[in-house]
Image (cartoon, rainbow, N blue to C red):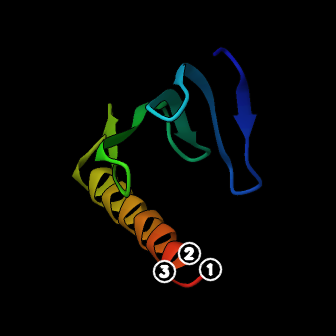
Amino acid sequence: MGETFQSTEGISGQFRVVKPYQQLRLRWEKREWGEPSTLQIRLLSNHPDKTTISFHQERLDNPLAREQMKLHWEGVLAAIREHITHP
């Protein structure tokens, strides 16, 4: 917790909660945004061979930003799914 990051794509943030194999909660911001959002990623599983990945992002400025981030995280899930089914 407390570690910061900066990507080459202009995304920066700080890890606020780290629970291995369960949850990440972090401050997450794109370079062009005025304020950071809060991103929570959770791994939920009641079965050893199935896991649900949940993305929840709060404090986005407007409906357009919410839609953009929804599409972004759907793309991330699709990439994970593709990697798992076609390693």
Q: Based on the displayed image, in which of its 4 quarters is residue 23 positioned?
A: top left
Q: Residue at x 42, y 73 (%)?
A: 78
Residue at which label 3 appears? 85
How packed is label 1: few (under 14 Cα within 10 Å), some, or many (20 or more)? few
Q: Residues at badges 2 and 1 in contact (C-beta under 8 Å)?
A: yes
How far apart are the alpha carbons under marks 3 and 1?
6 Å
Residue at which label 2 appears? 83
Image position of 70 with respect to 1: above or below: below
How far apart are the alpha carbons under marks 2 and 3?
6 Å
Q: Residues at badges 2 and 3 in contact (C-beta under 8 Å)?
A: yes
User: Taking 22 as reference, is 54 left or right?
Assistant: left
What is the x, y in percent for residue 5? 72, 34
Please state which amino acid type lies under the numbered disc 2: His
Q: Based on the displayed image, in which of its 4 quarters is residue 69 positioned?
A: bottom left
Residue at which label 1 appears? 87
Element assignment for label 3:
helix
Between residue 1 and residue 49, name the one nearer to us: 49
How packed is label 3: few (under 14 Cα within 10 Å), some, or many (20 or more)? few
Q: Residue at x 37, y 49 (%)?
A: 48
How packed is label 2: few (under 14 Cα within 10 Å), some, or many (20 or more)? few
Q: Residues at badges 3 and 1 in contact (C-beta under 8 Å)?
A: yes
Q: Residue at x 40, y 34 (%)?
A: 40
What is the x, y in percent for residue 2? 66, 14
Q: Is residue 46 visible?
A: yes
Looking at this view, name the residue that lies furthest to the bottom: 86
Between residue 24 and residue 8, name the one nearer to us: 24
Between residue 21 and residue 60, name the one nearer to us: 21
Q: Quadrant of the N terminus?
A: top right
Image position of 39 with respect to 74: above or below: above
Q: Residue at x 62, y 80 (%)?
A: 87
Please state which amino acid type lies under the numbered disc 3: Thr
